[in-house]
Image (spheres, helix red, strand yellow):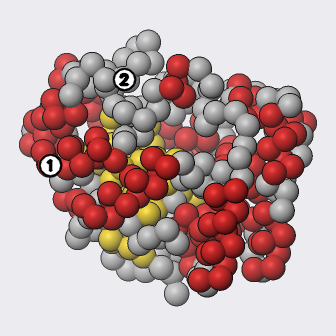
Amino acid sequence: MVNTTHLGGSASNVVVGRISHGLMTMHLRAPPEVPDEVCFASIKAGVDRLPAGAKMFLNSGEFYSHTWGLQNLEMLGRFYAKYPEYADKTFLSVKGAVAEHREPDCSMENMRKSVGTIARALGPHKKLDLFQPARIDRKLSIEEIMGNLVVLLKEGHFSHIGLSECTAETLRRAHAVYPVTAAEIEVSLTSYEPETKKVIETARELGVSVLGYSPVGRGLLTGKITSAADIAPGDYRHNWSRFKDGNLEYNVSVVSVFPEFAVKKGVTPAQLAIAWVAALGPHVIPPSRILVLHSNPERTLENCAAGDIELSAEEMATLNEFAESVEVKGTRMTGGREEVELWG
């Protein structure tokens, strides 16, 4: 049986698959890009396995591209043009509201520009279901940001509101203005911070979904990365401090025991890592990230199957202990200003 769950906030009547599709890595690589037909087949595979009435949650961004452009959204536009019947089978979330200098800008002017750009890229066959500011704009109060989002929602640009990299307190204040459907934060066995736990618990209390991105620790938990040589040239991870020489070797060593847990369970390490995130609560929805080098239906189905894995109390206790004890070196993202300002 394929497990499903309900979204939160104003989308509480929407049933989605237990695992979502994160589309970012489809277009992070420099040309040649992953062909449309490969992307289309991977998306369809995840959708087609769901029971009737359930939607696949798709997570995209206005800047999901190696050039910080619209490649991912334009691919989705072509997908919906070719398969218009999949518009109602998917729930599409897109992050935006980033200024040209890559800083968050949640002013009314910039967010209106952002949702307009997204709509043009998607084309006429799919309306934006949920819009998320990619980061919390610290120049504005969260109440101002939500006020701007509510205006755009009532104008019909999208149907639901989400937040990304918000603290528990920010989520609570935002939800008091208008129901937040989902909060997107990083959740993995290698990134289980105190604030992460607070957001998950606050979201549970408020009836908000948590989109737990990077559940396999950006590959650290797959057991397939032993050195920088295992990461393809041009891969974005080469720029991140956790994957730099010195840090990477250490991090590989501290998670080296994890594949043994997966072997004992009879699943892949990626499946177990995703299953643990999903087991943190029915409101926590991890993505099956469609990797650039593995954008194929088989890998999609393999990772989506993680949502159907049941973990015993003993298994959860073991994995929770692992999450609490593992301390990786390097920050979650670039290690620069981005890392300092992730939580807003």
Amino acid type of the residue that numbered disc 2 sits on in the rendered structure: Pro
Quarter of the figure with residue 60: top left
Instruction: Give x and y (percent) for residue 23.
Output: 53, 46
Of marks 2 and 1, which one's residue comes earlier in the chain?
A: 2
Residue with the mark numbered 2: 104
Identify the residue shown where x is 14% and y is 49%: 176
Farthest residue toward the bottom? Answer: 1
Quarter of the figure with residue 45: bottom right
* Disc 2 element: loop
| Residue 191 makes an appearance in the image | yes
Identify the residue shown where x is 82% and y is 75%: 263
Residue with the mark numbered 1: 176
* Disc 1 element: helix
Instruction: Give x and y (percent) for residue 92.
Output: 36, 51
Task: State which quarter of the image contains the C terminus.
Answer: top left
Is 165 situated above or below 321? above
Q: Is residue 319 left or right of residue 143?
A: right
Mark 2 closeness class: few <14, some 14–19, many ≥20 residues within 10 Å: some
The number of numbered badges drawn on the structure is 2
Residue 82 is labelled as none
Depth check, mark 2 against mark 1: the one in front is 1
Nearest to the observer: residue 163 or residue 343: 343
Is 221 situated above or below 103? below
Identify the residue shown where x is 77% and y is 34%: 243
Q: Is residue 101 left or right of residue 325?
A: left
Amino acid type of the residue that numbered disc 1 sits on in the rendered structure: Ala
Instruction: Give x and y (percent) for residue 121.
Output: 37, 33
